[in-house]
Image (cartoon, rainbow, N blue to C red):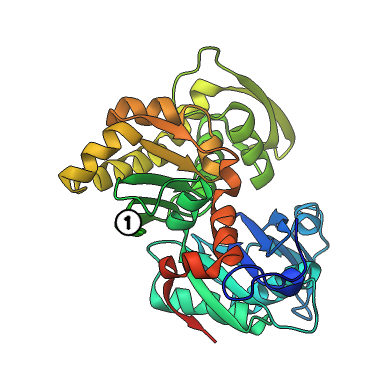
Amino acid sequence: MDTGGGRRSGGWTPLGRDLAIDLGTATTQVHVRGRGIVLDEPTLVAVDTRTGRLVAAGTAAQEMLGRTPDRVVTLRPLSDGVITDPDVTEQMLRHFVARVRPSRLVRPRAVVCVPSGVTAVERRALEDAAIRCGARSVHVLEEAMAAAIGARLPVESARASMVVDMGGGTTDVAVISLGGIVNARSVRVGGDEVDEAVVRGVKETHGLLLGERSADDIKLRAGSVWPLAQELTVRVRGRDLETGLPRTIELGSEEVRRMIEPVTAHVVEVVRLVLDVCPPELAGDLLDSGVVLTGGGALLRGWTERLRHELGVPVRVADAAEHAVIRGAGACVDDFAVLRRILVGAPRV
């Protein structure tokens, strides 16, 4: 892999200094030009409430969940794909960028991914955070387009491609043709809402209070959106709401599926709406090419079967689906000249 000189007019630049950043609700990923994905950590921080300063970020902060003293709190600075705490987000992003920057001499260009439904104000907040962290210019790329590129779909072709990117805070659905998004919808529903549905369901059904990490563990070990050939079970420990003491229960994948059904049904409906308004010619293409699922949420068991049953089109999960968005953004960083026209608007400098 060449990380030295080379083409400057749209290919490689020295030092691999340019960055692609997918600042997601659940995970932050960074791609450095010429090096690939160099960071993939939880979008989580630990902050000292007395000083407002960052104590830890990413995996280090995740390990502190539920274990911090009173003066330190762990929090997510993004919600539903957008920044909710600009100061903490900037500290976190500065921490991550400082870890991966290969050069302190030249300020990098950055490609930042945003949900399709982001407002101008929310988009500007992301751009501002990247600029203040040292980027000399910031280009914006919609997550659905980045996911399609990362899934190696023929986005420049006249034939339609459809991608469903299931993130932690948002789900982006888009039909793409001739290098542009023909139709798209973004809903602020994702993996976090699945976790919340599990917490709520266990509380209402079993009178047990779960933490965020326990809910995520249940989702990974027994979550599904379609009946499984062999249903799963998982042992769960939480705090009994009546006694306040620890208690262990056993959950089956069928019960978990019922708990998260309102969330998964919402996602299915959004995908159906995008298909319903797709131009006839492109809809015909999708009967052949089908739907490609990306994002960490696509790894939940049964999505291909559920959507195939509901929509009547082929469905598949992209390879390394959880990295599709950052791979697509990284492709833009690696070759600005070829892919620059798919970026959203003029770069921020």
Identity of the residue drawn at 60% across and 78% down: 129
Can you see residue 71?
Answer: no
Residue 210: give x, y in percent of width and height: 64, 41
Residue 293 % position (x, y): 46, 40
Q: Residue 195 in the image: x percent, y percent?
A: 55, 43
Residue at the extreme front of the image, as rendered: 6
Q: Position of residue 187 (x, y in %)?
A: 38, 54
In the displayed structure, 146 sits above or below 199; it is: below
Counting other residues with Cα less than 10 Å from the Cα at mark 1, is it few (<14), some (14-19), or many (20 or more)?
Answer: some
- Residue 121 falls in image quadrant: bottom left
The residue positioned farthest toward the bottom in the image shown: 349
Q: Quadrant of the C terminus?
A: bottom right
Looking at the rendered structure, the number of numbered marks drawn on it comes to 1
Q: Residue extending furthest left?
A: 280
Taking the image as shown, residue 98 lies to the left or right of residue 317, namely right
Label 1, secondary structure: give it. Answer: loop
Q: Which residue is mark 1?
A: 178
The image quarter containing residue 332 is: bottom right
For the residue pair 155 and 119, the one nearer the viewer reads as 155
Q: Is residue 319 left or right of residue 2?
A: left
The residue depicted at 50 percent of the width and 46 percent of the height is 152
**Res 304 → quadrant:** top left
Left or right position of 162 against 91: left
Asked whether 102 or 229 is in front, the reply is 102
Q: Which quadrant of the figure contains the N terminus? A: bottom right
Type of amino acid under label 1: Leu
